[in-house]
Image: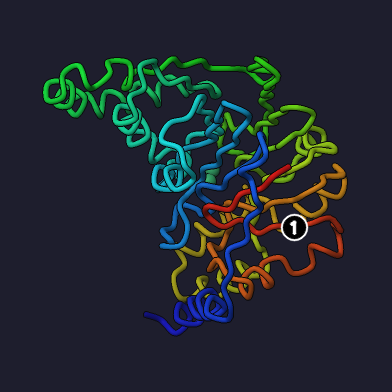
Amino acid sequence: MTSFLRVSMAVLLVAGVLCAHAPSAAAEDSPFYVVLLGTGIPLPNPARGSASTLVVAGKRTVLIDTGRRCMENLVAAGFQDASIVLFTHFHSDHFADFGEFMVNRGVAGATTPARVMGPAGTRGLVDDFLKLYSLDTTYRVAHHGEHWPAGAMQADVKECAPGVILDEDGLKITMFDVDHAPIVPAVGYRIDFQGKSVVISGDTKPTPKMVEMARECDVLVHEAMNVQMLTVVRAGLRTADPRRGQMLEDLMNYHSGTLEVAAIARDAKVKHLVLTHLVPSIAPTDGAERIFTQGMSAIYTGPISVGRDGMKIVP
Ligand SMILES: [Zn+2]
Ligand SMILES: [Zn+2]
């Protein structure tokens, strides 16, 4: 390991032993709450799954993205299935666990196809997953017979254009374009329920659309990248590992810096800002989070929560 990498890891991990707590709000009494199922990125971090967020709205559960380890964290949150799955875009850190999600519907006894919505490309992704799992499905149907519900490994897919994509029984879901160029399509979602609202950014650079869609929302769950931390890493990589240095540079061009996210929350008058998809993937500790959010409160004076897997947020 190069001395540079040692220093980088020390920055990320030593902060992790300073202190530890598990912030969560009491969500059980609220009909509307958010559970962060994955707050990490493609790079593996034992403490974080990749992108996945659950929104519970009364009897319904909306699962936004199914990143790595989403199933473990969904079960830990008390669920084995979801009423609706939404995809934001098709980077693998946002869909890796979809196949396992489908298999667990069979275990849960789901008798109706999974309801899946997302931008153009969703149908192909789902079809390919089901094809990938077709032998598994054959085995399970043959082995468990009538106990394995036929509908479990089927999906009812709807590809949507931005706008209101669902309005049922007081639950309204609005899809909107974000800016994750060159990745197109890439979308975020606003979920309204019983006079409260939650906005999920997906992966994006700062875009005026986010301010518009998050205006006066109760909770904005936004991706966040600490530019200062990454600049240090990038400077080291330029000589130690130019290939990875360039990849980091590419990455920094299609995400939102923490201070930019703070400005979005301020401009949109967001009531509670929650950070997820943390780049770099810091240790889930107070020390690391303090460094990660440095300077944000000078821009946005509302509450800021740095996401941890399993964290519950009540709007
Ligand atoms: Zn992405
Ligand atoms: Zn991502």
Q: Quadrant of residue 80?
A: top left
Q: Is residue 181 left or right of residue 79?
A: right
Q: Nearer the viewer, residue 215 or 239?
A: 215
Q: What residue is shown with label 1? A: 304
Q: Amino acid at mark 1?
A: Ile
Q: Nearer the viewer, residue 297 or 124?
A: 297
Q: Position of residue 86 (x, y in %)?
A: 54, 28
Query: What quarter of the picture does the C terminus occupy?
Result: top right
Q: Position of residue 102 (x, y in %)?
A: 35, 29
Q: Is residue 107 left or right of residue 266?
A: left
Crowd tier of the residue under label 1, counting other residues whose Cα lies within 10 Å: few below 14, some 14–19, many 20 or above: some
User: What colouring method underlies this structural image?
Assistant: rainbow
The structure residue drawn at horizontal position 58% and vertical position 81%, both measured from the top left corner, is: 18
Query: What quarter of the picture does the N terminus occupy?
Result: bottom left
List the single residue furthest toward the front: 29
The structure residue drawn at horizontal position 32% and vertical position 16%, both measured from the top left corner, is: 151
Q: Position of residue 133 (x, y in %)?
A: 25, 28
The structure residue drawn at horizontal position 59% and vertical position 33%, both measured from the top left corner, is: 186
SS for dot 1 = strand
